[in-house]
Amino acid sequence: MSTAKGGAIETLADSLILDSSRSILDKTRSGGFKGLQQFWTPDPLSKFIRDCLADTTNRSGNAFDPTAGDGSLLAPFINPRTELTFGVEIDKDHIPTDESEKRYRAIRGDIQNIAPLIRAVGITFEHVVANPPFGLAWEDKKWGKGSSTALAWRYAVEFLQEGGTGAFICGRDRWYREIAPITNGEVFYILEIGK
């Protein structure tokens, strides 16, 4: 079971269909829709992504998640010898503190404030993974205003080393509405999981 602010998503089938579809959005009083905002990637989905990236996860390179949460997407990249797996998480309550549960080196803060610092020192990562919150309005000095999904995509691409690998989770509707229009020829695979 995986939980999200605003409700619980009970099955893996439900959790794989995070496509911003009306089935997981709540109606607002004005007739619009409100998203769940935050979703923790379930371990089966993290393992699926690990399997998809299997030939790349045995490298000794670094990994980054701009919206890390509990770090489940970073788990395949953990290398205790190098300690080069980093994630940004705004909510200190979601950063594992028990040594046995730590999945990454946490940078506590808002990615909107951390991204300029990463940019300033010129750090890039061999692997970037993200399952960003959706339905939020974010702003970045370089990229301007945009949705949390769109800006998380921009961070993922910006901080990925040339030739690096990654995974980005977002709903089909959001992909076509918010991400596809801003891609600059980046190479990506789309896997659509239906009901």
Image (spheres, rainbow, N blue to C red):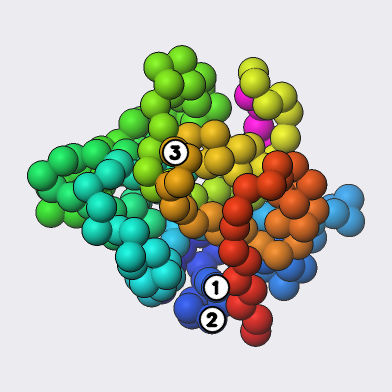
Quadrant of residue 87 within the rendered picture: top left
Tell me which numbered mark, 1 or 3, is placed earlier along the sequence.
1
Q: Is residue 114 left or right of residue 78?
A: right
Provide the major secondary structure of the magenta segment: strand
Q: Which element type, helix, strand or loop, lies under badge 2?
A: helix
Q: Which element type, helix, strand or loop, lies under badge 3?
A: strand
- Label 3 is placed on what type of residue? Gln
Q: Which residue is mark 1?
A: 16
Q: Are marks 1 and 3 in contact (CB under 8 Å)?
A: no
- Label 1 is placed on what type of residue? Leu
Q: Residue furthest front?
A: 163
Give the alpha-carbon distance from disc 1 to disc 3, as whole Å.
28 Å
Residue at the (59%, 64%) spot, across then down: 189
Report the span colored magenta: 136-140
Give the alpha-carbon distance from disc 2 to disc 3, as whole Å.
32 Å
Q: Which residue is mark 2?
A: 13
Q: Are marks 2 and 1 in contact (CB under 8 Å)?
A: yes
